[in-house]
Amino acid sequence: LITDNGSLLSLFGLGGLEIVGDLQIEDTFQLQTLEGLGSLRRIEGDLSIQRNGAIPSLSPLRGLAHVGGTLAIVDNPLIESLTGLEDVAHVGETLRIVNNPRLRDLQALGPIEALGENLVVTDCPLLTDLTGLNTIRTVGNRTDVRFNDGLQSLTGLEGLETIGEDLWIRVNPALRNVEALAALRMVEGQVIIEANPVLPSCQAQALLRSVD
């Protein structure tokens, strides 16, 4: 747990870590790199990278393959890509990509096939699509795509077949189509598609008809 440490400058003392329980790097203001975590291969619990004002890249996490709990990339003003997460093939609970104002795409995300809990992509204004999520087939609980000002399509969700609870597609002002959800056949909870002003209503209605 590395949190609320405004004077932390380096993680080089962690260079021998290969397997940890939880890894939380939060509320650092001078830490400019995740170098020092290059040996990390497996996190049994949660990986949380949140509110780090000076970290521009996740690339030192290359080699990480397994997150047993939640993977959260939240409130990082300088991160532009998910480069460094290419080998992550398993996230046991939730994938949260929230409020990263410079994040351009999700393309570097690894081949995750299922999420035990939630998929959340919100408040990332530079995302134009969701390419990088292509391998996800099942979300155990909620899928939440909201408040992404530049999001034009849901390209990247073509593989999604089952959602265990709700599907929320809300307040994406540039969203023009939801055709990428053509394979989605089961949503156990509510489907809420609203406040997407340029999305044709016929597409939203077609999606509603296609899911159980």
Image: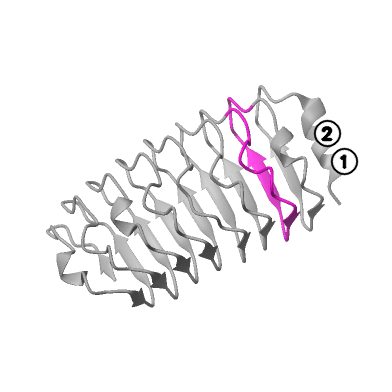
Residue 26 spot, x, y in % from top left: 30, 60
Q: In this view, does 129 lie above or below 118?
A: above
Secondary structure beneath label 2: helix
In this rendering, would 54 be left or right of 59? left
Q: Nearer the viewer, residue 130 or 121?
A: 130
Q: Which residue is drawn at 70% across and 34% down?
A: 178
Residue 167 spot, x, y in % from top left: 70, 49
Give the magenta-colored segment's residue range: 152-175
In this rendering, would 78 be left or right of 149? left
**Amino acid type, label 1:** Arg
Q: Nearer the viewer, residue 53 or 81?
A: 81
Residue 73 spot, x, y in % from top left: 41, 53
Residue ID for mark 2: 205
Do the numbered discs 1 and 2 sit on residues whose CB atoms are within 8 Å? yes
Does the magenta portion include 198? no
Q: Residue at x 45, y 46 (%)?
A: 108
Q: Is residue 30 above or below residue 11?
A: above
Residue ID for mark 1: 209
Q: In this view, does 62 lie above or below 16?
A: above
Q: In this view, does 29 lie above or below 90?
A: above
**Amino acid type, label 2:** Gln
In this rendering, would 39 be left or right of 30? right
Does the magenta portion include 161? yes
Quadrant in which residue 19 is drawn: bottom left
**Inter-mark Cα distance, 1 to 2:** 6 Å
Q: How crowded is mark 2: few (under 14 residues within 10 Å), some or many (20 or more)?
A: few
In this rendering, would 23 be left or right of 156? left
Q: Which residue is drawn at 86% across and 43% down?
A: 210
Secondary structure beneath label 1: helix
Q: Quadrant of the N terminus?
A: bottom left
